Image: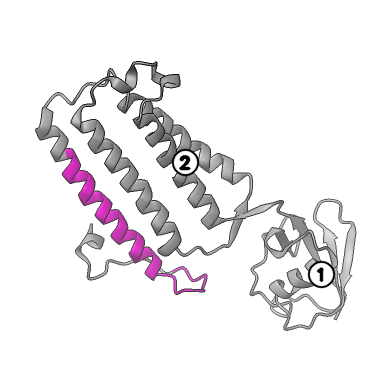
Amino acid sequence: MEVEILDFRSRRILCTLKDLAPSSTISDVKTEYHEKFPKSYPDRQSFRLEPRGKSLKDDDTLESLEVNKGGKLYYKDLGPQISWTTVFLVEYAGPLLVYMLLYIRPAIVYGPEAASKPYATVVHIAAACWSGHYAKRLLETLFVHRFSKATMPFSNLFKNSGYYWGYGVLVGYFVNHPLYTAPMYGDAQVYTGLAMFLFNEYGNFVIHCAFRDLRPAGSKERKIPYPTSHPMTQF
């Protein structure tokens, strides 16, 4: 069975795929296209029935899409891709790194005398909370999260990382500044805030685990979330 592949913009015929069957999936189409154009790996390919149509799912079959012999599919190059896991690791490692660099009060940022000035206790607590939060996010990326898609556009790396890294610098600069003053209500405010932080971090972890369990390993299923037996999912 032959299917013509056309560029979605110019409508120019890019190639004709000949080794397909009615039961072939879009994933099979991507594999065949990749064999003809090695630089266009499957994750950067998008096929649609119409030039401005929606991208077809990998498990859609040609038969179900009513693409017959001599039919046409329109191809769009999604550009360089990067894995979701890599993006998450980079965007979470950044604020952890920049914050801890500011925590040691580098002379180039705060001046040569800054490191020798005393730290308020809450500054040490804040550093522990910040590093613990992002260490948790890194570990969740590796061992908890399940992504429905393998990749995203490479350009998203800079957009996502810029947000996290930027706020890491903004928060870290002021909290670790030698002129930072402790909260108005002292230890009561600090340790109340710490208790709330730990409670919410635990709740966040529980919810991430609950979301993970909605998608069986190796699938792209999206179940509707419902409260589980764990009390943290009731809120």
Residue 170 lies, in percent from the top left, at: 40, 28
Q: Earlier in the sequence, mark 2 or mark 1?
A: 1
User: Which of the two discs, 2 and 1, sits closer to the camera?
Assistant: 2
Using a 10 Å C-alpha cutoff, classify the residue at mark 2 as few (fewer than 14 neighbours), some (14 to 19) or many (20 or more): some
Callout 2: helix, strand or loop? helix
Label 1 amino acid? Answer: Glu
Residue 56 lies, in percent from the top left, at: 67, 66
Residue 114 lies, in percent from the top left, at: 33, 19
Could you tell whether 217 is left or right of 77 in the image? left
Q: Is residue 158 above or below residue 18?
A: above
Q: Which of 103/47 is in front?
A: 103
The label shown at residue 35 is 1
Figure quadrant of residue 233: bottom left
Q: Is residue 43 above or below residue 136?
A: below
Label count reads: 2
Could you tell whether 145 is left or right of 227 in the image? right
Q: Which of 74/229 is in front?
A: 229
The residue wearing badge 2 is 94
Query: In what quadrant of the picture does the C terminus appear?
Result: bottom left
Could you tell whether 180 is left or right of 183 in the image? right
